[in-house]
Image (spheres, rainbow, N blue to C red):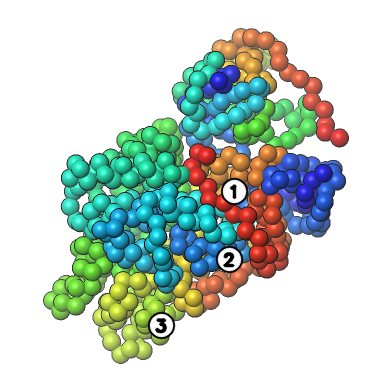
């Protein structure tokens, strides 16, 4: 049983490719399948018409590394509407949240749904010695 | 403890992002470490600032039969290819039916490289099992050819299939997909593909679509009716419900040069509307095909046997010559190549004296009219002669190459030992990296590597390939960006490339500075497994 399956998104997997249609299955905090996913899931997120991408890495705040939506990788995933996504933060009101981000998974857990924070699942990353 | 550490690489990781310095750790065939450290390893190789890239994936190959005589497929390995996809252009080695084995044998003759094959397989699964018994050096995937499927059911019949025949073709496609085919391919300029309606193709593709397969197509036209052909390909993908891979995208025929702006605009429009379509390309201005393809479609009807009979009949022969000389309402390769001096005979086993010559040159030698000589060569070689047709413009080649949905695919046709061929079989990948990256600067090094690695890997659903990152298969190529280049030419089509230092498949060294190590870690890849 998968924890979460994101269905029929346009996957922009971070490898630089044009989008392709597919599902993403998440289990124990990791991406376990990309492509066509069969089998039951505890939660299904419909991503029809939405872009499914690896969670964005703000490289100004920590080290760069390749991150693609690839089986075996940490399930940090953002699902957004490419027509709708937009920043609303301004100089006058710098803490307004952006529009168009439907879901955010951090370590395989639903962290943001429809712009509302669901829980905090981030971890501290340490450089491998 | 790592099995292997590649030290001091300039890592071009397949994403298209800028190269970075680092070491790559390999264990049990997988990349397990990428970074600045040097974890302990049984063996380490200092690559001295050479480029380390994911092994190249040739998404458009015709090596289906090559492995039976050359399981390493040396011409591909020498280029850094670690995975290839066969069964393209409608032509696959399976399924085979007893009844139409002879037809299939003739249909696939120009990709058989002159071998005597056992044909001891029937289903697509049998064929993959046969490949699995061979000491493969690189990884092999295949799609099932719609032409081969149709021949297995109805030979070269030029008619609409009955409902029973259609159902049988669908069964064969479903069975092939279940055995590991990556999708269905068509070759709509060759019989029997040329006889098929769009509706028939959609129906035949449905079982593949239901199994997550891809529609790989050599379109019905790549010249004066190319936009309509592209619309057809897109319609098949939409109605069957599957991604589309446009094979060896090109613009043929001088009157059509520049048309790549329109074809690529159509691709972009389809993608903007939500249709997943991608393309591949080989980096040459000449195409290559069977010499029989210079004949009008009606002359090829009924398969090779019928074609040869028509060539023996004087009045039919005259009509064929007339059609080649004047007609442009079909894909007239001679007309589009500017005449017979644009058609180069590459392989003609029964008339080797003409190999490497244009039809015009060969005709002078033979003291015959060029059209008569060309038809004689088709006849004497029983349809197995191959040619190159110089029908593209460099600007279209470059324009297509730059497009982000376009990947590299060789379309390499293996030649019988000693015969001439199109140099793309032995030169495609190093030609991109030498000529088009270093010399012409059409692509950056990173873009070019991306088009040979992650781009085709994602298209194929091979998520463990095409990138240098922990967890991915250790299929790797090490090359010198200053010296990499193709040496294969139309005259010396099998000359080995330069600048490729090491090739690893699944963490095992298979090529060391141009020498095969004899290791055979290659696997038969099956779709979604």
In terms of secondary structure, where does tag 1 sit?
Answer: loop
- Callouts 1 and 2 in the same chain: yes
Residue B37 picture quarter: top right
Q: How many marks?
A: 3
Outermost residue to the left: B315
Say the numbered circle drawn on residue B352: 3
Q: What is the spatial separation of the Cα atoms under label 1 and label 2, in whole angstroms?
A: 19 Å
Q: CB under 8 Å between callouts 1 and 2?
A: no
Label 2: few (<14), some (14–19) or many (≥20) C-alpha neighbours in 10 Å: many
Of the pair A113 and B111, the residue shown nearer to us: B111
In terms of secondary structure, where does tag 3 sit?
Answer: helix
Task: Pick whichever of labels 3 and 1 is earlier in the sequence.
Answer: 3
Q: Is residue A42 left or right of residue A106?
A: left
Of the pair A129 and A12, the residue shown nearer to us: A129
Task: Pick whichever of labels 1 and 2 is earlier in the sequence.
Answer: 2
Q: CB under 8 Å between callouts 3 and 1?
A: no
Q: Which residue is mark 1?
A: B453
Of the pair B358 and B392, the residue shown nearer to us: B358
Report x, y in % for residue A94: 69, 13
Chain letter behind tag 3: B
Residue B235 picture quarter: top left
Residue B111 picture quarter: bottom left
Task: Pick whichever of labels 3 and 2 is earlier in the sequence.
Answer: 2
Q: Which residue is mark 2?
A: B74
Quadrant of the rendering where the C terminus of chain A is positioned = top right
Closest to the camera, between mark 3 and mark 1, is 3
Q: CB under 8 Å between callouts 3 and 2?
A: no
């Amino acid at each position: 049983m998968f924890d979460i399956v994101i269905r029929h998104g346009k996957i922009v997997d971070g490898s630089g490719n044009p989008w392709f249609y597919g599902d993403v299955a998440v289990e124990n905090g990791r991406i376990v399948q990309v492509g066509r996913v069969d089998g039951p899931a505890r939660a299904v997120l419909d991503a029809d018409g939405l872009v499914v991408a690896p969670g964005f890495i703000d490289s100004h705040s920590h080290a760069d590394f390749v991150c693609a939506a690839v089986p075996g990788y940490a399930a940090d995933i953002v699902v957004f509407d490419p027509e709708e996504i937009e920043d609303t933060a301004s100089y006058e009101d710098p803490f307004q949240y952006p529009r168009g981000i439907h879901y955010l998974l951090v370590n395989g857990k639903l962290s943001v749904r429809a712009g509302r924070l669901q829980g905090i699942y981030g971890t501290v990353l340490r450089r491998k010695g | 403890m790592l099995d292997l550490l590649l030290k001091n690489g300039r890592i071009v990781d397949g994403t298209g992002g800028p190269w970075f310095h680092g070491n790559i750790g390999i264990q049990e065939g997988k990349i397990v470490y990428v970074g600045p450290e040097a974890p302990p390893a049984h063996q380490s190789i200092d690559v001295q600032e050479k480029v380390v890239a994911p092994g190249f994936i040739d998404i458009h190959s015709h090596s289906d039969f090559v492995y039976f005589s050359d399981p390493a497929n040396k011409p591909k390995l020498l280029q850094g290819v670690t995975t290839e996809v066969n069964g393209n252009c409608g032509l696959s080695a399976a399924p085979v039916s007893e009844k139409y084995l002879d037809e299939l044998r003739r249909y696939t003759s120009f990709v058989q490289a002159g071998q005597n094959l056992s044909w001891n397989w029937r289903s697509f699964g049998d064929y993959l099992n046969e490949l699995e018994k061979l000491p493969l050096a690189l990884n092999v995937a295949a799609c099932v050819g719609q032409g081969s499927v149709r021949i297995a059911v109805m030979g070269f019949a030029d008619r609409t299939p009955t409902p029973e025949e259609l159902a049988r073709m669908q069964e064969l496609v479903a069975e092939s997909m279940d055995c590991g085919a990556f999708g269905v391919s068509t070759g709509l300029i060759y019989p029997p593909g040329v006889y098929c309606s769009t509706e028939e193709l959609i129906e035949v593709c449905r079982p593949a679509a239901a199994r997550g397969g891809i529609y790989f197509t050599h379109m019905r036209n790549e010249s004066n009716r190319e936009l309509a052909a592209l619309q057809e390909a897109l319609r098949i993908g939409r109605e069957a419900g599957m991604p589309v891979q446009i094979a060896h995208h090109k613009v043929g025929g001088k009157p059509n040069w520049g048309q790549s702006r329109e074809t690529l605009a159509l691709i972009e429009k389809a993608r903007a509307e939500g249709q997943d379509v991608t393309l591949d390309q080989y980096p040459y201005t000449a195409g290559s095909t069977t010499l029989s393809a210079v004949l009008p479609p009606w002359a090829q009807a009924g398969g090779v046997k019928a074609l040869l009979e028509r060539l023996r009949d004087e009045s039919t022969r005259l009509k064929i010559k007339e059609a080649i000389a004047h007609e442009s309402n079909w894909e007239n390769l001679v007309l589009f190549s500017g005449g017979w001096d644009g058609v180069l005979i590459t392989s003609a086993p029964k008339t080797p004296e003409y190999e490497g010559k244009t039809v015009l040159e060969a005709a002078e030698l033979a003291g015959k009219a060029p059209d008569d000589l060309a038809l004689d060569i088709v006849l004497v070689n029983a349809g197995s002669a191959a040619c190159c047709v110089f029908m593209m413009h460099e600007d279209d080649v470059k324009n297509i190459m730059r497009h982000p949905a376009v990947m590299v695919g060789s379309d390499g046709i293996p030649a019988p030992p000693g015969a001439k061929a199109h140099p793309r079989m032995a030169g495609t990948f190093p030609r991109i990296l030498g000529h088009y990256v270093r010399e012409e600067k059409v692509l950056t090094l990173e873009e070019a590597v991306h088009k040979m690695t992650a781009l085709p890997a994602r298209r194929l659903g091979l998520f463990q390939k095409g990138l240098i990152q922990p967890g991915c298969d250790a299929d790797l190529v090490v090359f010198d960006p200053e010296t990499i280049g193709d040496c294969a030419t139309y005259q010396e089509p099998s000359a080995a490339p330069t600048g490729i230092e090491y090739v690893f498949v699944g963490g095992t060294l298979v090529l060391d500075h141009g020498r095969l190590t004899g290791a055979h870690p290659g696997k038969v890849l099956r779709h979604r497994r």
